[in-house]
Each structure stands twice: as structure tokens, then as C-alpha cells.
């Protein structure tokens, strides 16, 4: 289950910031925190996980069961491939 794997990779934050979406639209970015209830009906987009050996910030845009679009910020461990 893709959502479950995303949740496992999430690390907590508790503040809310704003992100610029395009030139004119500003959409709030929700910071994931441990225990945050996520109502993900459809994932619209996800940032790719970079090939680094570190915890890095990433974003997921999703639609909830009410049809409202959200942007979620969370940290994920990089792929850490060494080749």
C-alpha cells in the first residue's frame, strides 16, 4: 500500500508554512507530524526521492475524500545508492 509506505517514511514536524504554487496561487503546505490523520483519496504528485545518504524534505500533493487538494511536507531518507 503506497500510502502506508509513505507514512512509514515520514518524520514529524508541527508547523505550517506557505508554498508558492505557480506565479499567482499560494497554497498552504501542511507539515506532517507523528499522529497526523491523513485523508488521502488520490495522490496527485510526489517529489522523487533523491539519491543521497541523508534525510531530505519532500512533498506530496493529494486530494482528500471531500475533493479538496492538499500539499504535505515531510522528510524521507534518501536512496543512499553508492555506485
Image (cartoon, rainbow, N blue to C red):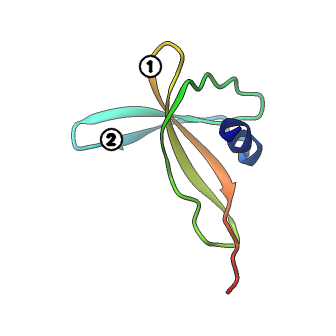
Residue lying furthest top: 66
Residue 21, which numbered label?
2
Q: Which residue occupies 65% across, 25% down?
A: 38
Q: Residue furthest front?
A: 1
Q: Nearer the viewer, mark 2 or mark 1?
A: 1
Near mark 1 (Cα within 10 A), the count class, few <14, some 14-19 or many ≥20, is: few
Q: Earlier in the sequence, mark 2 or mark 1?
A: 2
72 versus 58 height, above or below? above
Corner quadrant of residue 6: top right
- Could you tell whether 35 is left or right of 31 in the image? right
> Which of 62/24 is in front?
62
Instruction: Give the quadrant of residue 80.
Output: bottom right
Q: Quadrant of the N terminus?
A: top right
Kind of element beneath mark 1: loop
Q: Secondary structure at mark 2?
A: strand
Quadrant location of residue 33?
Answer: top right
Can you identify the residue that label 1 sits on?
68
| Residue in the picture at 73% in, 46% down | 11
- Alpha carbon distance from label 2 to label 1: 15 Å
Q: Are discs 2 and 1 less than 8 Å apart at CB?
A: no
Q: Nearer the viewer, residue 1 or 73?
A: 1
Instruction: Relative to 53, say whether 18 is above or below.
Output: above
Image-based side of 44 in relation to 20, left or right: right
Residue 29: x and y, percent? Answer: 49, 36
Q: Residue at x 59, y 26 (%)?
A: 40
Q: Position of residue 2 (x, y in %)?
A: 66, 41
Decide: is 52 above or below 16. Answer: below
Question: How many labels were placed on the picture?
Answer: 2
Amino acid at each position: 500500500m503506497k500510502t502506508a509506505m509513505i507514512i512509514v517514511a515520514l518524520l514529524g514536524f508541527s508547523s505550517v508554512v506557505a508554498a508558492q504554487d505557480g506565479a499567482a496561487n499560494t497554497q498552504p503546505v501542511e507539515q506532517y507530524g507523528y499522529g497526523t490523520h491523513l485523508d488521502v483519496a488520490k495522490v496527485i504528485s510526489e517529489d522523487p526521492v533523491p539519491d543521497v545518504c541523508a534525510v531530505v524534505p519532500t512533498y506530496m500533493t493529494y486530494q482528500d475524500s471531500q475533493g479538496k487538494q492538499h500539499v504535505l511536507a515531510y522528510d524521507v531518507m534518501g536512496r543512499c545508492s553508492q555506485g
